Image (cartoon, rainbow, N blue to C red):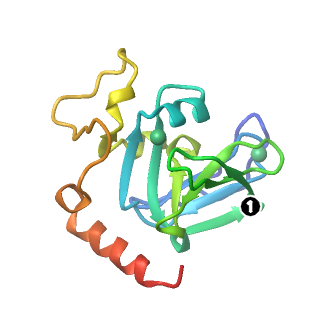
Amino acid sequence: MTITDEYGVSELPMTETENTHEGGCTCGAIRYRMETKPMIVHCCHCHWCQRETGTSYALNAMIEADRVTLLLGEPEMVPTPSNSGKGQKVWRCPECYIALWSNYPGVGDRVHFVRVGTLDEAHRLPPDIHIFTSSKQPWVVIPDGQPAFSDYYERDKYWPKESLARRKQVLEQPG
Ligand SMILES: [Zn+2]
Ligand SMILES: [Zn+2]
């Protein structure tokens, strides 16, 4: 089976299995694969994410950088201000400038915050946790039972054990 679309992005084998996720930019110059499921998926309702996406929230899948394989092209890093004041690195297609993922200070370059909307099958990664709901658009309704926080939350309480272990491991790598 091959991926084909109106942009002529084709001939790429469909290698997605249960836990891998492939994605890319709009023009097709960048293709990538997440080799495993992410540690966590955040839906961030902060004003910064609203502005950066032009919509109402950002969906970010946090995954170890070494679990993201570039299949085609080389993203370009665009230094971008962030809410923390420390800035973020947004990696974009050098041709169509769609944002594919970001790195933030803290975990740094070792963890990619992959923009879930760039995945071919974004519906397979719904949010685990909603953050910064204090600035959520009023018409966005969070399903009952979904963890949601007015700003941030205690990671140890809400992340699966396996994801906490993965985060610990990645922080032990040189950053
Ligand atoms: Zn592109
Ligand atoms: Zn945000």
Q: Quadrant of residue 158?
A: bottom left
> From what the image shows, is residue 129 above or below residue 16?
above
Helix, strand or loop for disc 1: strand
Crowding at mark 1 (Cα within 10 Å: few <14, some 14-19, many 20+)? some
Looking at the rendered structure, the number of numbered marks drawn on it comes to 1
> From what the image shows, is residue 24 above or below residue 46?
below
Q: Residue at x 50, y 50 (%)?
A: 84
Q: Determine whether the beta carbon of the residue marked 1 sits less than 8 angstroms from the nearest atom of ligand 1.
A: no
Q: Residue at x 47, y 68 (%)?
A: 107
Near-viewer residue (118 or 155):
155
Where is residue 40? Give x, y as percent: 35, 55
> From what the image shows, is residue 68 above or below residue 40?
below
> From what the image shows, is residue 149 above or below residue 75?
above
Left or right relative to 142: residue 174 = right
Residue farthest along the top direction in this orientation = 139
Near-viewer residue (4 or 164):
164
Near-viewer residue (148 or 25):
148
Callout 1 amino acid: Leu
Q: Quadrant of residue 169?
A: bottom left
Near-viewer residue (2 or 155):
155
Left or right relative to 15: residue 159 = left
Q: Residue at x 51, y 70 (%)?
A: 67
The residue indicated by pointer 1 is 72
Q: Residue at x 58, y 30 (%)?
A: 51
> For the C terminus, which image quadrant?
bottom right
Where is residue 87? Give x, y as percent: 60, 53
